[in-house]
Image (cartoon, rainbow, N blue to C red):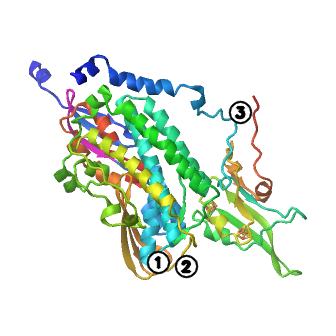
């Protein structure tokens, strides 16, 4: 009796699916030895809606609003990935004006996504204040979206072949005003967090995932860049005219949670840089390329991947020549990044688990689809 | 030496506190007092659907072409019509729109050739019953009438 009592027993703790720090409905089964985590097991699928199957029963145009509901924090990036994939399938290039507008909106969406990530990540780690500020700034971006396309979150802003809506009066002015207003705010977050002792103590050296492991798991996005790998699809395989803009790819060195924070902060600044360049160079012209009303792509397949705020977001579409996709497959960055959770969490303390889940920046709508 | 002094006097902490303090100024208040203070949504806002009528004679603009119903990914619009033998056109009889399943994507609005169906700026669509969310032609023409609260 006494002996089994003294044996260190592995305690199994269920975290989620209703845990507020799992950013949705993720269930993580933690195997604990005291305060240390020996291993994890993720249970996903609580938010499964069968989006890929829905696609097989919708026409190409009809499916576009559904992709917004995968990564609902960055719905415009999802929309861009989907329309680019279909455009590749039907071999249509959108107009220059539409391309630039797409870039502006996608970059604003990247900032919105990073802001939500920053707020919730800080909240998980124990700093409540940044959440209020980041949501305030995000609100301004959502207002621009609302003015542009009429919806804030599930925007359905792009159509196959271009855009549905022309820019509204004062769009450029509003975007520039946002950029000017936003830059000091980033400095403000940095003041609150970057040198904050609690923040550093909680993040530095936590959840290390080095470059080799990142590649092994197929991890992309800021997590990979924080490991020192300069990989950004916007530079590596430019789409939608990204080769025209000047921006840097921020990379980290230590591959820990703190570096991922720094990388994302810098990414927000770089996004502002891209937005400024793009707003100054919106060409005149039509916003919609010639696309038939009834879309029947030729038999074939197309894969397009873009740099979503969370990593490489890919759309693979197989066409059988009918009006519906034969098969549509999404490569969601969150799901693939989440695989690395087990490795990152092993040996860490229980309290670090929420920090590590936060730093991966997952969205369950995208994981479960 | 300086980092140590910084550590002892908690400089970073006060820096952060200063940010919070600065943001306490009343001009930074951002909260909307919703039922009292009503937000002004954007002009293009995709909210409650409306079936437009001709303001001069009160007749519907809809030509019963069924394009909106065909464009909708959720198949939630049902249009019925009868053929008018005199004008050789179709006359709209009923128009049902199930807002409970609508995702306000705007595809129906885009499809309408005569701008009869429109998504408007009304955003208060709640109902106590499920049936209340299925809007008929009359409801679509008149628009929702949410209770307004005054302070
Ligand atoms: S807004 Fe979209 S989902 Fe709603 S009725 Fe129109 S097409 Fe259908
Ligand atoms: S598309 Fe417009 S005109 Fe045609 S049935 Fe719908 S509302 Fe009526």
Horizontally, residue B95 falls left or right of residue A246, namely right
Tag shown at residue B36 = 3
Question: Which one is nearer the viewer's eye here, B149 or A321?
Answer: B149
Horizontally, residue A95 falls left or right of residue A332, namely right
Quadrant for residue A319, please give it.
bottom left
Which structural element holds mark 1?
Answer: loop
Please state the chain letter of the residue tagged with numbered disc 3 in the rendered image.
B
Q: Main secondary structure of the magenta part?
A: strand
Asked if disc 3 and disc 1 are in contact, CB closer than 8 Å, the reply is no
Q: Please report the residue visible at 18 percent of the width from the left and 31 percent of the height from the top.
A: A10
Question: Which one is nearer the viewer's eye here, B18 or A156?
Answer: B18
Q: Residue A271 at what x, y percent from top left?
A: 41, 52
Q: Residue B130 at what x, y percent from top left?
A: 66, 48
In the image, residue A84 above or below residue A71: below
Q: Nearer the viewer, mark 2 or mark 3?
A: 2
Label 1 Cα crowd, 10 Å radius (few <14 / some 14-19 / many 20+) = some
The residues tagged by marks 2 and 1 sit, at their Cα atoms, a distance apart of 8 Å
Tag shown at residue A92 = 1
Question: Which one is nearer the viewer's eye here, A367 or A4?
Answer: A367
In the image, residue A261 above or below residue A52: above
Residues rendered magenta in the picture: A32-43
Observer able to see residue A58: no
Q: Residue B99 at what x, y percent from top left?
A: 65, 54
């Amino acid at each position: 009796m006494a002996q089994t009592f003294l044996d260190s027993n592995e305690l199994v703790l269920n975290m989620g699916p209703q845990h507020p720090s799992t950013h949705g409905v993720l269930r993580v089964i933690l195997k604990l030895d005291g305060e240390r985590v020996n291993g994890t097991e993720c249970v996903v699928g609580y938010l499964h809606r069968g989006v890929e199957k829905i696609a097989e029963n919708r026409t190409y145009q009809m499916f576009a609003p559904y992709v917004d509901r995968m990564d609902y924090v960055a719905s415009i990036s999802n929309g861009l990935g989907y329309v680019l994939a279909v455009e590749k399938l039907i071999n249509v290039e959108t107009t220059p004006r539409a391309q630039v507008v797409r870039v502006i909106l996608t970059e604003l969406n990247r900032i919105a996504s990073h802001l939500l990530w920053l707020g919730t990540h800080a909240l998980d780690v124990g700093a409540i204040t940044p959440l209020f500020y980041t949501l305030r700034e995000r609100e301004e971006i959502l207002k621009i979206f609302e003015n542009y396309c009429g919806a804030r979150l599930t925007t359905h802003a792009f159509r196959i072949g271009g855009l549905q809506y022309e820019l509204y009066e004062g769009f450029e002015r509003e975007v520039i005003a946002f950029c000017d207003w936003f830059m000091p705010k980033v400095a403000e977050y940095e003041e609150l967090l970057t040198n904050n002792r609690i923040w550093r103590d909680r993040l530095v050296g936590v959840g290390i995932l080095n470059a080799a492991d990142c590649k092994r798991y197929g991890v992309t996005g800021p997590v990979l860049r924080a490991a020192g790998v300069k990989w950004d699809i916007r530079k590596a395989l430019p789409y939608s005219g990204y080769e025209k803009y000047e921006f840097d790819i921020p990379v980290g060195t230590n591959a820990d949670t703190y570096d991922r924070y720094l990388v994302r902060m810098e990414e927000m600044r770089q996004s502002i840089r891209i937005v400024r360049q793009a707003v100054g160079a919106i060409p005149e012209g039509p916003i919609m390329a010639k696309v038939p009303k009834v879309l029947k792509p030729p038999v074939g397949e197309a894969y397009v991947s873009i740099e979503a705020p969370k990593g490489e977001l890919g759309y693979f579409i197989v066409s059988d020549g009918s009006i519906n996709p034969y098969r549509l497959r999404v490569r969601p960055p969150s799901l693939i990044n989440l695989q690395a959770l087990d490795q990152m969490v092993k040996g860490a303390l229980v309290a670090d688990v929420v920090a590590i889940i936060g730093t991966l920046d997952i969205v369950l709508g995208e994981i479960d689809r | 030496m300086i980092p140590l002094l910084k550590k002892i006097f908690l400089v970073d902490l006060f820096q952060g506190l200063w940010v919070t303090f600065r943001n306490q100024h009343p001009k930074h208040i951002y909260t909307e007092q919703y039922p009292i203070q009503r937000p002004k949504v954007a002009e293009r806002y995709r909210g409650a659907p409306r079936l437009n009528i001709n303001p001069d004679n009160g007749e519907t603009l809809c030509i019963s072409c069924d394009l909106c119903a065909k464009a909708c990914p959720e198949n939630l619009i049902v249009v019925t019509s009868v053929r008018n033998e005199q004008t050789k056109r179709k006359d709209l009889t009923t128009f049902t729109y199930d807002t409970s399943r609508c995702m306000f994507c705007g595809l129906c609005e885009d499809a309408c050739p005569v701008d009869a169906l429109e998504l408007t700026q009304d955003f208060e669509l709640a109902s106590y019953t499920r049936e209340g969310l299925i809007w008929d032609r009359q409801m679509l023409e008149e628009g929702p009438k949410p209770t307004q609260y005054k302070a």
